Image (cartoon, coloured by chain):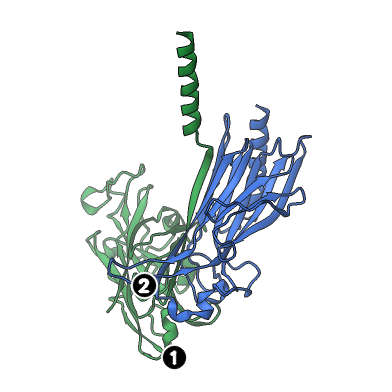
């Protein structure tokens, strides 16, 4: 019961924070959530391509400036993500390469592009003494550097990332395990997802442009919350 | 027997543990991108703005066509009961912007964006479609049906060759006769910006325009496009012979079905 009250409090704080940013001419709907028993949910909210000076969202041009390495700090914002949990959790992200979509069965083109995906987060939680705490920061992943091996990250008490032991299960994986008050961590996360291509030799956009066919490209990014035992 | 039961219990527990799924929640983000895309144009976003309440309704659809019915009730609250029925002489059309259509995509060769309006119709207090027409008037006080004139009051397009460089054009008139930026021409067809009041509440007013690149060397035109059109709705009475009188319309819900479609090619 105590956990439920804590969770609802965290959610209500989020609601008030969101409301404060809404302008008078824009109305948004917010779903207030409560919880009974253990509840854990993670959601991506993709951003559609925006116009003019708002260069964000998907689909985007792979030759566009904002997705090239080093043009901006984070790259192009392509999605929001959020998480809420009233039970202990471990976060796992699987990242696939950006892959050319064949137009039909006779299409002989193929291409895989490496990139860096970056998750920013604002993490609200209650510590073991019942005091509200928050963390902010980011974790990112370069599909060109890991050679099929995963990597584990831990959220430290300062909000930064501590690197764990690389995984070797063949996936491009990120394991994020809340290390703060690890026996009692619950809470909510809100953040953005950014995309940029890599600067390494695997960046075909810049180094081997003729091997990059015109057409559509897609990559799958799967986020999992698993129970932390 | 006891040993057998114990063994079965252990086997059952093992089976449950084998099938146990530690996943509490999952979601997948599909990263979408393209290079030199020449086909499969998408309406990635269509916004409709209710000018009275400020509510921003956004319609998103990844298909080339998108149909929406816009509830104009809030807009009408300002004008129903106002003085003159015939507002066509109002010079401040911009302040009466009813809604705008904003379409973005990533291909600019030739496309045609068509916006069709049907006449404003009364849908009853509970939203049930019992249109208030001359044949089904509620009482003598409610004089005929209401139709509406739609005015295109603003038109703007933006072509983007990179993330930062844009070519823009816009004009605020009843027509779309404005300057043509280098490399582009427009072929605009507007049947009539001031259609006469029709006795047919199903009459359709169509705005249609086409943007074509005439500069074959302008490779940048394939990158991005953005079209916005803002419309005002001017009320007039169904039997236009009484233009200038007060609107006597029942309270309730009014809707003006609007169809927006996008066609690639000439």
Q: Which residue is mark 2?
A: A109
State the residue at coordinates (23%, 48%). B136
Determine the colour of chain B: green
Q: Which residue is mark 1?
A: B182
Above or below, comparing residue B145 to residue B26 in the picture: below
Residue A113 in the figure: left or right of residue A214: right
- Give x and y (percent) for residue B61: 38, 60
Circle 2: element type: loop
Q: Quadrant of residue A105?
A: bottom left
Above or below, comparing residue A201 to residue B258 in the picture: below
State the residue at coordinates (52%, 58%). B54
Front-most of residues B210 and A227: A227
Q: Are marks 2 and 1 on the same chain?
A: no
| Chain containing the residue with disc 1 | B
Above or below, comparing residue B151 to residue B30 in the picture: below
> How far, Cα to Cα, is label 2 from label 1?
36 Å
Front-most of residues B66 and B8: B8
Specify the farthest residue to the left.
B135
Residue B83 in the figure: left or right of residue B149: right
Front-most of residues B173 and B46: B46
């Amino acid at each position: 019961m105590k956990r439920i009250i804590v969770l609802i409090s965290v959610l209500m704080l989020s609601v008030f924070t969101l409301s404060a940013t809404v302008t008078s001419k824009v109305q948004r709907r917010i779903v207030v959530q409560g919880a009974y028993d253990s509840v854990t949910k993670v959601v991506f909210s993709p951003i559609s391509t925006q116009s003019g000076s708002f260069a964000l969202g998907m689909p985007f041009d792979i030759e566009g400036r904002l997705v090239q390495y080093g043009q901006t700090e984070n790259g192009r914002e392509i999605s929001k993500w959020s998480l809420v949990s009233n039970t202990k959790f471990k976060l796992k992200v699987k990242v696939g390469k950006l892959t050319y979509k064949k137009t039909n069965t006779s299409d002989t083109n193929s291409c895989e592009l490496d990139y860096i995906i970056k998750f920013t987060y604002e993490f609200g939680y209650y510590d073991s003494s019942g005091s509200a705490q928050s963390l902010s920061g980011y974790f990112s992943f370069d599909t060109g550097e890991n050679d099929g091996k995963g990597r584990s990250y831990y959220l430290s008490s300062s909000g930064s990332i501590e690197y764990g032991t690389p995984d070797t299960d063949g996936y491009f994986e990120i394991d994020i395990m809340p290390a703060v008050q690890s026996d009692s961590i619950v809470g909510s996360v809100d953040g953005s997802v950014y995309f940029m291509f890599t600067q390494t030799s695997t960046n075909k956009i810049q180094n081997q442009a003729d091997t990059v066919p015109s057409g559509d490209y897609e990559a799958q990014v799967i986020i999992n919350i698993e129970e932390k035992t | 027997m006891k040993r057998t039961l114990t063994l079965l219990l252990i086997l059952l527990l093992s089976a449950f543990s084998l099938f146990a799924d530690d996943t509490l929640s999952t979601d997948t983000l599909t990263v979408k991108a393209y290079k030199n895309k020449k086909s499969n144009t998408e309406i990635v976003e269509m916004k409709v703005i209710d000018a009275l309440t400020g509510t921003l309704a956004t319609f998103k659809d990844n298909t080339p066509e998108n149909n929406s019915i816009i509830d104009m009730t809030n807009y009408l609250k300002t004008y129903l009961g106002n003085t003159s029925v015939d507002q066509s002489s109002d010079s401040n059309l911009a302040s009466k912007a009813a809604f705008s259509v904003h379409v973005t995509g990533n291909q600019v060769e030739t496309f045609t964006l068509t916006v069709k309006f049907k006449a404003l119709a009364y849908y009853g207090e509970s939203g049930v479609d019992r249109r208030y027409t001359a044949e089904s008037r509620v009482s003598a006080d409610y004089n005929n049906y209401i139709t509406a004139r739609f005015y295109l009051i603003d038109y703007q397009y933006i072509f983007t060759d990179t993330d930062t460089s844009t070519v823009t054009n816009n004009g605020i008139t009843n027509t779309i006769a404005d300057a043509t930026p280098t490399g582009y021409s427009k072929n605009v067809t507007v049947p009539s910006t001031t259609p006469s009041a029709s006795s047919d509440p199903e009459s359709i007013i169509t705005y249609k325009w086409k943007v074509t690149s005439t500069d074959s060397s302008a490779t940048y035109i394939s990158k991005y496009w953005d079209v916005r059109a803002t419309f005002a709705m001017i009320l007039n009475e169904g039997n236009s012979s009484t233009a200038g009188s007060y609107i006597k319309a029942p309270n309730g819900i009014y809707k003006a079905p609007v169809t927006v479609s996008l066609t690639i090619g000439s």
